Image (cartoon, grey):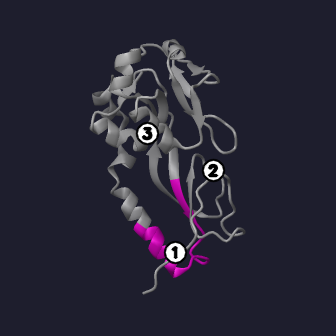
Amino acid sequence: MGAICQPEYFDDRIIDLVHDKYDIAFRGGQITDSSLISRQVCQLHRILVASPAYLAQYGVPKLPTDLMYHKLLTRRFLGGKTVPWIFNTENGSSLTLDTQSALMTLSSPEILTQMAVSGVGVANVGVHLAWKYLVTGQLKVLLYDIHNPGSFAMTLQYPHRALIAPRVRVVVDYLLDAFSQQEELHVELSELQAFKA
């Protein structure tokens, strides 16, 4: 059996799988293309995190407004939009923190996570990226009770069966099985309480 060797492209632009000749796509958020088969891999959430060393030096924020005095690490999508920092208020509405004065704005959530682990500042990252550092005590969750973690589905998409090559079907089955076994992709929000600062 020959190896499947295909180029990999990871970015956040929308592609047309059939027209652009892609076999598989991972998409986050709302899926609008119903001409493809969509298989949900997981629901992802974002959390605010910082290292214990950072919190020892700068203090633990108790309110969203406290974050104005912290070093914020935020993400910008390739399209230019930044990830919002949203908080639930006591009256049931929401508050979005202005992160224009963030210490750093990067496109890589993995690097943001590493910077938080290194004590550079407070980052808004996916639970799946922070999980192993929470478990080992290298990160703490901030403003757990009021931060709105959002929720977006990560979905695997591929052409309908009439168009799908057998090799692609094998890869799809493998990926779905592998992702189902990744603990960090299936963390319940309630589990994060144990890691609050």
- Drawn side of residue 163 relative to residue 89, left or right: right
Residue underneath mark 1: 168
Where residue 66 appears, x then y in whole percent?
49, 13
> Is 118 drawn above or below residue 15 in the view shown?
above
**What's the CA distance linking mark 1 and mark 3?**
33 Å
Residue underneath mark 3: 114
Whether residue 95 is visible to the viewer of this picture, yes or no, is yes
Range of magenta residues:
155-174
Dot 3 or dot 2: first in sequence order is: 2
> Is 109 drawn above or below residue 182 in the view shown?
above
Residue 130, image quadrant: top left
Q: Residue at x 46, y 45 (%)?
A: 43
Where residue 188 appears, x then y in whole percent?
35, 39
Q: Residue at x 38, y 17 (%)?
A: 57
Dot 1 or dot 3: first in sequence order is: 3
Where residue 183 appears, x then y in whole percent?
32, 49
> Is 71 drawn above or below residue 190 in the view shown?
above
Q: Nearer the viewer, residue 90 or 46?
A: 46
Amino acid type indicated by mark 3: Gln
Pair 2/1: label in front: 2
- Drawn side of residue 129 relative to residue 132, left or right: right
Task: Give SS at disc 1.
Answer: helix
Residue underneath mark 2: 12
Amino acid type indicated by mark 1: Val
